[in-house]
Image (tube, rainbow, N blue to C red):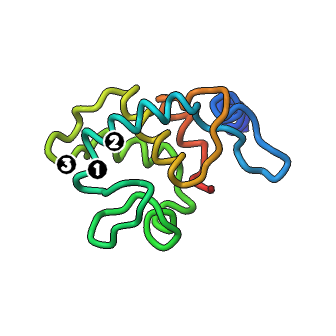
Amino acid sequence: MRALLLAAGVALVVTGGISAGGQADGLYTSAQAGAGEGLYDDQCVSCHGNLSAFVPEMAALLGDHTFRNRWEGRSIGELFQLIQEEMPQDAPGSLSNDETANLVAYILAGNRFPAGDTALSSDLEALNAIPFAP
């Protein structure tokens, strides 16, 4: 029980709080997503396409019928870990914790998660407590 309460407390600190609807209120900052956008353009767009446009032949990271359905019910931590360990495809494991957090922030922004005043953490335990639920 103590571990569960600790995880919930960590999630509240990381997310900046939970809104009345149960939705996380601000998982990342706009500046963090902006930093992630530049990195995404350099490292990810050639395989995953632009986050503002769905391109069927790409491994899209947005859209209700592809990316979001795949991640529904999973955690932000799983997404962070996948990116950190397996991306970019031509240099897996080369991203720093901060770069990975910035990329996740940008992907969250593209999937209509709200920005807030607290940057997305790179602490995997804390991120595992946050569900992917836009």
Q: Is residue 97 above or below residue 47?
A: above
Left or right: residue 115 versus residue 128 is: right
Q: Nearer the viewer, residue 13 or 42?
A: 42
Which quadrant would residue 40 be assigned to in this image? top left
Residue indicated by mark 3: 89
Residue indicated by mark 1: 45
Percent position of residue 33, x then y: 49, 36
Q: Is residue 97 above or below residue 82?
A: above
Which quadrant would residue 81 be assigned to in this image? top left
- Label 2, residues with CA under 10 Å away: few <14, some 14-19, many ≥20: many
Q: Residue at x 28, y 47 (%)?
A: 44
Q: Nearer the viewer, residue 106 or 126?
A: 106
Percent position of residue 5, x then y: 73, 35
Q: Is residue 62 above or below residue 14?
A: below
Would you say the residues marked 2 and 1 are in contact, meaning their CB atoms lie under 8 Å apart? yes
Left or right: residue 66 versus residue 73 is: left
Percent position of residue 55, x then y: 34, 67
Residue 3 visible, this angle: no
Q: CA distance from mark 2 to mark 1?
A: 6 Å
Mark drawn on residue 40: 2
Left or right: residue 80 versus residue 115 is: left
Residue 34 visible, this angle: yes
